Structure formats: structure tokens, C-alpha cells
Amino acid sequence: MRAYAFRLYPSKAQQKEFEHHLWIEKNLWNSLLENIKKRYDEEGRFYSQRELQFIVKDSGLYAQSAQAVARRLHRSIQAKVRAKNRGQKWGFPRFKSFERMRSILYPQSGFSLGEKLKVSSFGEISIVRHREIRGKIKTLTLKREASGKWHAIFTVEEETKIPKANNGPAVGLDLGLNRLATLSDGKIIKNPRNFRKFEEKLAQAQRSLSKKLKTSHNRCKAKCQVALVHEKIAHVRNDFLHKAANTLLSNYSKIAMEDLRIKQMSKQGHGKGIYDASWGMFTNILCYKAESAGSEIVFVDPKDTSKECSGCHSIVPKSLWERTHHCPACGIILDRDINAALNILARATAGMAGSNACGDGITIPSMKQEAAPFRVR
Ligand SMILES: [Zn+2]
């Protein structure tokens, strides 16, 4: 499954109608939830999905969209019950405010896509189809963004592609803050320069928001401004990460990374808003693109990857700001992150034919190669 998002330009009347539907949906969600809680208090059991789907009949929403609300609520309660049985903490679904209710799902029908997007009870909505949809459209989600923009999101079933043959080498990859990634062959992927610019813009918008009076109209506008910057950041970051992933996957057949679930992210200390989400997202993108690119992603234990010497495996303690790995035991001098990337690669290829834990057959880059950024485009 793959998602395509397109900008919508609904008329004033359509916007109003749509907001009315979101309002109904919000009320539906809240009243269902209230019913569920009441039922549980009285009888000690939850509604079945069937019962819920019966209750949402004649809600005023498109029938399948209402069913989707019931299904979503039922699913999150099931997740809650399962987690409880496992002894884990899990939040119970919450009541929603109108602000939080942002989208309506059309699971199978109720819409058709031509020159315009035709949706049941809204009519034809202007849509900008900036790219071709490949595959069969499964669902439509109409979404009102916090910034006030409208989007249509289609999930599409893709035809299974035959993986490309990938004869590239294996590489170790160390994720960082100053650069997105440092590779074991000495190449680097820089973060886009405009991240810094966006950071400033975001701080500015947030400052301006904090000065506005609680109930003023200007506060609404300032809030919208903050949402717009967030949206822009997400867009630029997403675009960059996708391109970076494509660059890597077309060059390497095997990419070794640290297992971020084990690694304590806070260890890095100075995580900045924009970079925060990048690592997890980048990992996800790499993973789901890897198969069709004929590449493999391998996760390794992140313990001491930056302290261990990639040459002789002795542990060389260093502080965060030491950028160079200088091993007193074997004398090797390397960029700190390249050393880590080499360790990551060695861990992923340990015990495999043609290589071993010592990293034989892996070219160790020199310090000079540090300035060899990949052109991500
Ligand atoms: Zn050493």
C-alpha cells in the first residue's frame, strides 16, 4: 500500500459542508465513546464491532465513513484490552474536540477521481493532481490541516515490482545531528542547509504566538502561521529523506545501521526539533524502500560503536565533542563518525563469507575523504 496526497481547493460552501461533517463525526466519536464507557460500567463488557456498526447507522455521515469511525474506535479499544492483558500501559481512546477531528475516511466508495474529485455529499472538488497515481485506489481520506489547507489522501495498492538486481557493496551508516549520515566508506550525507533557516522561522512564529492574547483573532492567525511552518518543515524533511534514501539504496546492496530502539537517543544531548524525527523516519523509509531496490538493511547492537576502535577493537573513550578517533593501541586516526560507521558495518558482516568481524576487505577511508558529500538530489 502506498499513499498519495493532493491539495484540494474546495469552494466556500464545500468547506462549510465539510466542516459540518467533521462536526458530526466528532459528535459521533464522542457519543460512541460515552456509550462504550457506560456499557462497560454497567455490564463489564465492551460493544462488539457489529453492535457499534449498528449504532452508527443514520448518523448523518456517509454510511461507510461512519462505519470507519466505529471500526477505528473498536480497534483502539481492542488494542487497549490486549495491552492490559499483557500487563502494559495503554491509553484509552479519548474524547475529541473539533480541533482534533481533522479527517473523514471513505473506505471503498463514495468518491470518484476524474478531472476533479467527486465526493458524495460535497460534489466536485478542485484538486491538483501533481503526479500520476500508479495502482488501484483503495481509500480516500479528506483532511483539513491545522494550517487550514485541505488535502485528499489516497491509499493505493501497488502492483508488486520485481526487485532490481543490486550489485553494490555493503556499507555501514552512522546517523548524526550535524550530518544526517556518515558512511563507512567516508562519504557523508549532509542535512539540508535550509533546516537552520526553518528553525529560526519556527522560533519566530512561536514567539509571535506567545505574545498574542488568548482569545484574540490575531492569535488564531498566529496559530495558523506556526502550523504552516511545521507543515513546510515536514514537507522539506520528508522530501530530503526520500531522496537521501534513494541515493543510498541505488549505491549499496547492504546497509548496516544501529538499532535505534536500543540506542538512547537522548545520549546525543543536543537534539533539535527538526532533526529529532529524522532518524526514525529515515530508518522507516529505508526499510520499506529496500526490498524493491534489491537492498538489505541490517540492524546491529549500538553499544560503544563510537568508542570501539575499528582497527584493533580496543575501547577508546571519548567525549561528545571529540570529532577524531585516535587509537593509542594501533595508532589509527579517523573521523569519529567514520570509525563508528566502520564498526557498524563490521558488526553486520561478522561471520559472513568474504568478511569477518575485523572488517577484512573493507577499505578504511583516510581523514581526507571526510569531505566527500553525496549529492542528494
Ligand atoms: Zn586501535
Image (cartoon, rainbow, N blue to C red):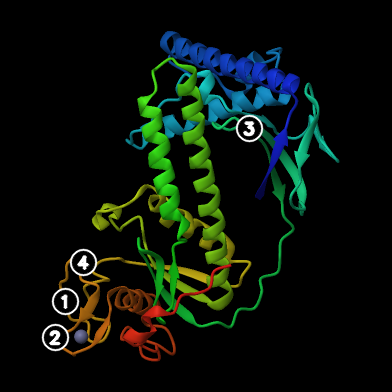
- Upstream in sequence: badge 1 or badge 2: 1
Judge left or right: residue 44 versus residue 312: right
Judge left or right: residue 32 versus residue 127: left
Q: Residues within 10 Å of mark 3 (few under 14, many from 20)?
A: many
Q: Residue furthest right?
A: 115
Kind of residue sitting beneath label 2? Pro
Q: Position of residue 27 (x, y in %)?
A: 57, 14
Mark 1 or 3: the one toward you: 3
Is residue 295 visible in the rendered structure shown here?
no
Q: Do tag 2 and tag 3 residues touch (Cβ < 8 Å)? A: no
Q: Do tag 1 and tag 4 residues touch (Cβ < 8 Å)? A: no
Q: Residue at x 74, y 29 (%)?
A: 10
Query: Which label belongs to residue 143?
Result: 3
Cβ of mark 2 under 8 Å from ligand 1: the answer is yes
Q: Do tag 4 and tag 3 residues touch (Cβ < 8 Å)? A: no
Q: Residues within 10 Å of mark 1 (few under 14, many from 20)?
A: some
Query: Which label belongs to residue 321?
Result: 4
Q: Please give the residue where the numbered disc 1 appears in the rendered image.
A: 316
| Quadrant containing ligand 1 | bottom left
Q: Do tag 1 and tag 2 residues touch (Cβ < 8 Å)? A: yes
**Mark 3: secondary structure:** strand
**Mark 4: secondary structure:** loop
Q: Residue at x 73, y 42 (%)?
A: 138
**Mark 1: secondary structure:** loop
Kind of residue sitting beneath label 1? Val
